[in-house]
Amino acid sequence: MNFETLGLAQPLLAALADSGYTTPTPVQLQAIPPAMQGQDLKVASATGSGKTAAFVLPALQQLLAARAERRPGPADAAGAAPAQRRAGSGPRVLVLAPTRELAQQVAKAASSYGRHVKGLKIATIVGGVPYGAQLKALRGPLDILIATPGRMLDHFGAGKLSLDNVGLFVLDEADRMLDMGFIDDIRHVAAQLPAQRQTMMFSATFAGAAGRLASEMLKGDARTIATTSHTDTHVNIEQRLHWADNSSHKHAMLEQLLTEPTMEQALIFTSTQRDADWLADQLAQIGHAVAALHGGMPQGRRNRVLTGLRSRQLRVLVATDVAARGIDVPGISHVINYGMPMKAEDYVHRIGRTGRAGRSGLAITLAERRDIGLIKRIQQFTTQQIPVATVVGLEPKMAAPVLNPERRPMGAGGFRSGPPNGSFRNGPAPGGFRNGPPHGGFRAGPPQGGFRPPAQGGFRPGPQGHGAADGGHHGHPGERSFGHDGPRSHDSRPRPAGRNAGGFRPGPRQR
Ligand code: AMP
């Protein structure tokens, strides 16, 4: 099956050919045909599955069809500009995304897939950037609007945006939007849209609140498509769990991991913004090309950091869950969980930042005893077990905790370093399974010996031991966050700072 057989118009096929994509991914294969026919869709699909094209291509196809209706004739098949699109009349397609980064990534994909659609107008409306350019974009003719809910509602409330023309409404990463507290915003937006619209909802899971929202938002005959689930094995992502005796041990392991020759680029997750700043500082001090990325940073700086990561000026990025959502950088060879995610689902999103674009990736979790509960929840959520490994020279002194020994290892579905016989052991055992270190310097399986101090550098205290509330924050003086991504009340007045607002805030567990 190729893209031609899906019935996509020539300008879209040409753009796909430019991108080098020949075969639709499973989600594209299943979603594009009903989406092109105008059906409502409820799509369970993870990031990295090609889901963006699954809604962007049908959206572009519909724009082309709408142009053809307005100006009959063969010219539209070649993507001719619309004859009567009125300035300021509002977009035909509205995409809501939970984070600025994801919105910008969707916009990039839309520009790329729509590069042969003449006169295509796409606007991105996110918080953290000045209003001026956005107001200008909203005044002109507009085909596709991609937005985070807060800032979009600011413009709507101020009468600067019409939603009357929206024929297709896409909710991307709906589960994350709900996690971020956007439920009222989403309902408010939906209430402003024409009832006759088509709605597509994408979510990693439709369990719980996302499923309830789907029944509110979608028509009764909506098509359900599920191409991935959180229990799927990530065949190209090798996962490892390293038990740390304490935060110093964890930090020493991190430093050693970052010196591995196989590491192209690493994305390190922390639990809080404060920890992200602190850790980036620590790593910068020992010579890493590193930056932090979190929701407390102004958008301009966040953009610069992502550009630095893509251009490989940065080798290490220290990020929180929210900020890292949607990052699609093929060079990320390692994801390292330095701070635990709040929820098991976040673990799945985190590890999906590596192993992109057909490459393989390594996802390493550095856990302390206090993290046992969460590790168990992650294993229950994925129904898989993360194999325990040790860093050579930094083996833990304490025996690895026993976690659900009856569970199946992730090796069952293609995981590369599972025990050859399929039986997995957590605790120390003489001659326990040991894989040749594919990434060098690691040993999968139980600890083989006593704890040895790190080869170089010595241990550094973890963030817990870091004194000041600002914990080494290396913010730029004069920078401030506009922070308009957070949920809000529905009026057009300036609103109080959302959860990502207000610049750097050192509150505990702020993500
Ligand atoms: P997404 O899940 O939308 O974030 O897409 C993940 C990555 O897959 C992005 O880098 C896309 O550009 C890429 N991609 C999307 N569709 C295809 C395809 N049909 N073949 C190969 N790569 C694709």
Image (spheres, rainbow, N blue to C red):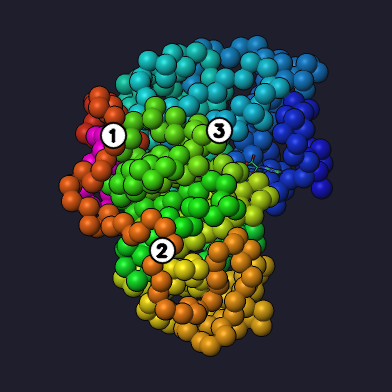
**Secondary structure at numbered mark 2:** loop
Left or right of residue 257: residue 189: left
Q: Residue at x 75, y 26 (%)?
A: 11
The CA distance from mark 1 to mark 3 is 22 Å
Towards the viewer: 403 or 118: 403
Which quadrant of the view contains residue 435?
bottom right
Whichever of callouts 1 and 3 sits on the residue coming sooner in the sequence is 3
Say which amino acid is labelled 2.
Answer: Pro
Towards the viewer: 428 or 202: 428
Q: Residue at x 49, y 57 (%)?
A: 257
What segment is highlighted magenta in the picture? 499-511
Residue beneath disc 2:
454
Left or right of residue 343: residue 202: right
Residue beneath disc 1:
475
Residue 399: x %, y % from top left: 40, 81
Residue beneath disc 3:
311
Dot 1 surroundings within 10 Å: few (below 14), some, or many (20 or more)?
some
The CA distance from mark 3 to mark 2 is 32 Å
Query: Mark 3–mark 2 contact, CB under 8 Å?
Result: no
Say which amino acid is labelled 3.
Answer: Ser
